[in-house]
């Protein structure tokens, strides 16, 4: 199925003109507006919605003015006191029937409006001395329409002021063409939503405080455009020709015998979903998500062996060499077929032999880093590509990995639990398998918060744990001392702890030579060192069941997801496990809320929901990897209910009118054009 053909752009053309087409907008102002609005076109300005509104309708007598309250008065100018020097203000005395007040101007004085004897409307705030310093607005009493009684407050940037936006916004509103309605009439009646143009006018040029319905209407427009684009991608993915990959189960049986444990019921259920996709005559695009330690790697290995049983090859791409080597060790241990490791450190004759093996098919299974997507890497017959920790790869890398095989199936894995909101957005085109449990034997991790002021006591406690045979991670957020940020460096912390505990302390960070870092990790895994000072290189791919204590220094500097991942490095063995979050004194409230949440729950999915609300989830239909998912009008938290509505609505529309030829379908084409979703189909295929 093809996505709907392009619509004529002439209808929406006025909205995609440059900002300089608007009244009073030169190149300099256009540049400033573009910086604030995220684009330098008329539609970018229209989508740059006010964040709040000022209500100036409270018209009062001067004697009733309350200091600090926003008011509007009507008064007569009775005296103007010019300053004796440039540093002094101009004072204008105004009077109504109840009393007098001073208007104070230190800079520009609107002399034409404030001639003696003139009656004026003045809006602003009085101070404690009964004077209004620099009123917000002064207009002649007979020109009430010139005063913005409900005044929008737009987000600004350095050098841009509200008055720079008023005329351009008013002009932009007149350029909105008569657009067809893309929503079902019953929905509009039920929600009480205005049409698209009216909603924009209500927010940008309100006569009364805008109703919530206006913003919700526009949010739903944006969400529906995104979900409609996803619906077509989903349908196309279901119809993409592939090939069935089936096997006799012999390799899997041998791998499980070597593994020594039976998969959990949840792992078996997920594997059944993957097997059904592999066997189907269409290409698989499936997300396997699960919390730290939920057993995703075993599922991926068994899926790869199914491809090999069918006579094809399988590849797994990991974002770091540490994680790739960890996966390789697992594959070597349980795979009954030859496996290979391809990273940047594999060079010379070894690399040449490996590339030849992939090309002729003698290497059926390979795991590697982004080195796998280099042009020099070719496969005889890649049947399954597994992409681990996908969010740490760029879109282009993920596309290239999936393209290494003819009709290759793609399984994407992430150990960062994904919020419900993102499942409908960034992952909406994928089938989703979810591992919510953990294999038997995983220990709960007790998490505690500690001020850096208690560091000496904490080091003493670590000493007692080491004396009892414990193995401890100590994570620092930096490698070398920063002059800007007062953070403990891994090297400096290593030197201090080494001085206290001697040779039992090791060091691992990303700036080390790979061989040195691997040796440090191997020493810790073997127990030759028992206190490993490290950076976030241990966040994924390090599996030491004997480790039972995790110390994270300056934890307030980490996001929730990395903290949860780091905590997952302990609790893998039989020992009671602990995570100690060291934070700066005088912790800010948002940081305290994050750390308290981590302390109080081990539920990665709850943590992921909160992390999404704090940081956002990346650009849904583009290549941006952080921030809110491509939304300008919708809010992830406030409009989550609309997102679910839009997902259902888009799926129904795509099923009933796959070519968007009906009256509503034609209107939906306009919607897709307005929100520029049509150009995004290719990036969505990357996962």
Image (cartoon, rainbow, N blue to C red):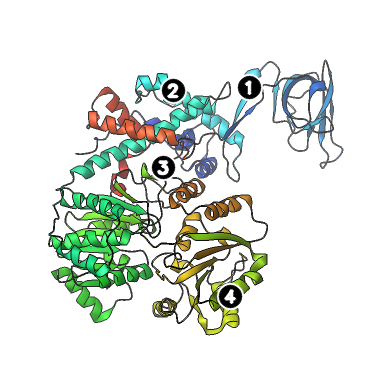
Task: Name the quadrant containing residue 376.
Answer: bottom left
> Is mark 4 in CB contact (under 8 Å) with mark 3?
no
Task: Name the quadrant containing residue 557.
Answer: bottom right
**Rounded to the nearest whole Å, what is the CA distance between mark 2 and mark 3?**
22 Å
Secondary structure, mark 2, is helix
| Residue mark closest to the camera, 2 vs 4 | 4
Asked if residue 385 can be seen in this view, the reply is yes
Q: Mark 3 points at which residue?
A: 421
Secondary structure, mark 3, is helix
Residue 15: image location, x then y, percent: 41, 32
Secondary structure, mark 4, is helix
Quick one: which residue is furthest to the right in this view? Answer: 84
Q: Name the residue under label 4.
A: 464
Q: Name the residue under label 1.
A: 146
| Residue mark closest to the camera, 4 vs 3 | 4
| Of callouts 4 and 3, the N-terminal one | 3
Residue 516: image location, x then y, percent: 42, 80
Residue 661: image location, x then y, percent: 23, 27
**Rounded to the nearest whole Å, what is the CA distance between mark 4 and mark 3?**
44 Å
């Amino acid at each position: 199925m093809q996505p709907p053909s392009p619509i004529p752009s002439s209808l929406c053309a006025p909205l995609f003109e440059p900002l300089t087409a608007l009244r009073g907008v030169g190149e300099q102002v256009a540049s400033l507006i573009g910086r604030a609005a995220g684009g330098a076109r008329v539609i970018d300005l229209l989508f740059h919605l006010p964040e709040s509104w000022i209500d100036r309708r409270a018209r009062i007598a001067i004697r009733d003015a309350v200091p600090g309250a926003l008011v509007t008065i009507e008064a007569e100018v009775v005296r103007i006191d010019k300053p004796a020097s440039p540093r002094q203000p101009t004072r204008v005395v105004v009077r109504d029937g109840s009393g007098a007040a001073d208007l104070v101007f230190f800079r520009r004085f609107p002399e034409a409006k404030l001639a003696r004897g003139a009656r004026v409307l003045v809006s602003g705030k009085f101070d404690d001395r009964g004077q209004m310093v620099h009123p917000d607005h002064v207009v002649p009493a007979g020109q009430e329409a010139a005063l913005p009684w409900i005044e929008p407050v737009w987000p600004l940037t350095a050098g841009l002021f509200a008055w720079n936006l008023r005329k351009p916004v008013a002009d932009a509103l007149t350029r909105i063409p008569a657009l067809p309605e893309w929503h079902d009439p019953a929905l509009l009646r039920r929600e009480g939503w205005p049409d698209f143009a009216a909603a924009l006018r209500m927010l940008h040029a309100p006569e009364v405080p805008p109703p919530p319905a206006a913003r919700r209407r526009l949010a739903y427009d944006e969400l529906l455009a995104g979900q409609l684009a996803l619906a077509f991608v989903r349908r196309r993915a279901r119809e993409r020709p592939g090939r069935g990959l089936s096997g006799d189960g012999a390799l899997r049986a041998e791998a499980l015998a070597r593994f020594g444990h039976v998969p959990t019921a949840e792992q078996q259920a997920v594997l059944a979903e993957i097997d059904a996709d592999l066997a189907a005559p269409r290409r698989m695009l499936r997300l396997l998500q699960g919390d730290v330690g939920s057993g995703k790697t075993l599922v991926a290995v068994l899926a790869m062996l199914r491809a090999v049983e069918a006579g094809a090859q399988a590849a797994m791409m990991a974002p770091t060499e540490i994680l790739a080597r960890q996966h390789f060790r697992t594959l070597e241990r349980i795979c009954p077929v030859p496996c290979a490791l391809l990273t940047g450190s594999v060079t010379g004759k070894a690399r040449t032999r490996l590339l030849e093996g992939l090309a002729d098919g003698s290497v059926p299974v390979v795991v590697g880093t982004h080195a796998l997507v280099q042009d020099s890497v070719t496969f005889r017959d890649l049947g399954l590509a597994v992409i681990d920790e996908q969010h740490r790869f760029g879109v282009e890398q993920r596309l290239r990995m999936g393209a290494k095989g003819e009709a290759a199936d793609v399984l994407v894995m992430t150990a960062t639990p994904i919020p419900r909101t993102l499942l409908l957005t960034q992952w909406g085109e994928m089938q989703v398998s979810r591992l919510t449990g953990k294999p038997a034997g995983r220990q709960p991790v007790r998490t505690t918060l500690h001020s850096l002021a208690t560091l000496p006591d904490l080091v003493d406690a670590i000493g007692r744990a080491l004396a009892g045979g414990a193995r401890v991670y100590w994570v620092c957020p930096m490698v070398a001392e920063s002059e800007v940020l007062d953070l403990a460096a891994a090297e400096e912390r290593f030197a201090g702890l080494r001085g206290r505990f001697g040779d039992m302390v090791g060091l691992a960070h990303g700036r080390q030579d790979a061989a040195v870092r691997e040796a440090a990790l191997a020493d810790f895994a073997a127990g030759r060192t028992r206190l490993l000072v490290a950076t976030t290189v241990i966040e994924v791919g390090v599996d030491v069941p004997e480790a039972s204590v995790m110390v994270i220094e300056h934890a307030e500097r980490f996001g929730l997801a990395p903290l949860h991942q780091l905590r997952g490095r302990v609790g893998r063995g039989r020992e009671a496990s602990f995570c100690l979050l060291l934070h700066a004194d005088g912790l800010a409230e948002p940081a305290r809320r994050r750390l308290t949440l981590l302390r109080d729950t081990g539920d990665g999915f709850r943590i992921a929901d909160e992390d999404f609300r704090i940081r956002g989830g990346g650009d849904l239909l583009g290549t941006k990897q952080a921030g809110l998912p491509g939304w300008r009008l919708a809010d992830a938290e406030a409009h989550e209910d609309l997102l679910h509505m839009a997902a259902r609505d888009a799926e129904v529309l795509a099923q009933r009118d796959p070519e968007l030829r009906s009256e509503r379908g034609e209107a939906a084409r306009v919607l897709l054009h307005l929100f520029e979703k049509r150009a995004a189909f290719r990036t969505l295929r990357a996962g």
